[in-house]
């Protein structure tokens, strides 16, 4: 219908609205991307926190010197099981493979049990020999019986079956490269010798040194001896400190990671005790006087 003559037509212009998003465009997408990135970084940090020291050192080394990990740098990865990694200075090193280390110790334990089982007097001694994998490494304990020991009474002179046993242990452990610690323990019964200067501290140290010497005579190199310690009765195995089971020799084949961190800032009970000679060294101690311990 046309407007009356002489009247201007009314023109109505309608604009289409763009809604809420028309004013902001894709800004929400940027915010969401930032959130996802932050969450990824958070979970990456949480993953690193749960890794071993070797893996953390390798990751830190990568960010210090990434070139060391490429084909030209001689490395192929930073996680356990990779060919190489780096530490603080960016130098390629082989990271500790915990599972492989455990497998090696378990294999060594199995071979050692088989070798000891072939000894002529093993049936008499088997209940006093304990071989197990611990957090520290492969622990071998030779425990004495109330009526039978591995050493002459009150001395550090090893009996023939003890020499034979330590010979077998030394030959089997010679196949490994791990450091070894030898520990001597006694019960709380006072040493019965005539000299008041020779106590259970000296006795435990001398027996540990005797075991160390026999191991070295049968395959263990001097470089692998990490420690020789005499603890006297300060670390009983049995609650009754007079129990014969507390008289023992412990041989510890240490894990690679524990042999690096051991004794850092820590003092052993043997070092705290007010005894004349709480900890044995690699030097030979004076021969004990006969007694009835």
Image (cartoon, rainbow, N blue to C red):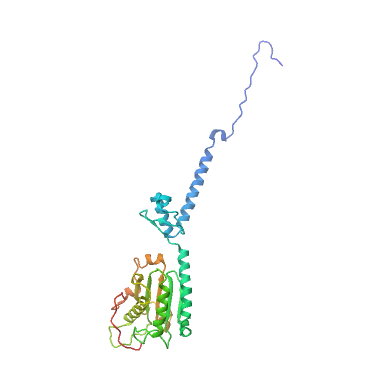
Would you place residue 82 above or below residue 150 in this image? Answer: above
Q: Nearer the viewer, residue 14 or 148?
A: 148
Q: Nearer the viewer, residue 248 or 215?
A: 215
Residue at the extreme top: 6
Quarter of the picture containing the N terminus is: top right
Would you place residue 9 above or below residue 50 in this image? Answer: above
Relative placement, left or right, of 194 versus 2 is left
Percent across and percent down for residue 266 are 35, 68
Q: Residue at image x 42%, y 52%?
A: 69
Relative placement, left or right, of 86 versus 6 is left
Percent across and percent down for residue 261 are 37, 65
Q: How many marks?
A: 0
Q: Quadrant of residue 183?
A: bottom left
Quarter of the picture containing the C terminus is: bottom left
Q: Residue at image x 46%, y 73%?
A: 109
Residue 70 in view (yes/no): no
Q: Nearer the viewer, residue 100 or 203?
A: 100
Residue 107 in view (yes/no): yes
Would you place residue 255 above or below residue 243 in this image? Answer: above
Q: Residue at image x 34%, y 69%?
A: 223
């Amino acid at each position: 219908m046309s407007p009356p003559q002489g009247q201007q037509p009314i023109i109505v212009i309608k604009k289409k609205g763009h809604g809420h998003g028309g004013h902001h465009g894709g800004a929400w997408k940027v915010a969401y991307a930032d959130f996802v990135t932050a969450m990824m970084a958070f979970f990456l940090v949480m993953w690193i926190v749960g890794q071993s020291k070797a893996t953390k050192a390798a990751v830190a080394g990568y960010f210090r010197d990434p070139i060391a990990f490429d084909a030209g740098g001689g490395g192929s990865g930073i996680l356990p099981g990779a060919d190489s990694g780096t530490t603080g200075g960016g130098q390629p090193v082989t990271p500790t493979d915990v599972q492989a280390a455990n497998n090696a110790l378990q294999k060594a334990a199995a071979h050692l049990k088989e070798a000891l089982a072939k000894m002529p007097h093993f049936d008499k001694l088997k209940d006093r020999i304990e071989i197990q994998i611990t957090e520290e490494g492969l622990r071998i304990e030779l425990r004495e019986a109330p009526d039978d020991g591995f050493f002459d009474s009150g001395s550090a002179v090893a009996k023939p079956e003890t020499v034979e046993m330590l010979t077998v242990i030394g030959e089997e452990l010679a196949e490994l490269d791990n450091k070894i610690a030898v520990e001597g323990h006694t019960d709380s019964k006072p040493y019965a010798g005539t000299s008041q200067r020779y106590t259970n501290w000296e006795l435990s140290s001398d027996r540990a040194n005797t075991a160390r010497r026999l191991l070295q005579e049968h395959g263990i190199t001097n470089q692998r001896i990490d420690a020789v310690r005499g603890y006297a009765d300060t670390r009983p195995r049995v609650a009754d400190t007079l129990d014969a089971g507390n008289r023992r020799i412990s041989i510890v084949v240490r894990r690679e990671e524990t042999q690096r961190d051991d004794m850092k800032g820590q003092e052993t009970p043997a070092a705290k005790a007010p005894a004349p000679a709480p900890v044995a060294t690699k030097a030979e101690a004076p021969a004990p006087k006969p007694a009835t311990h």
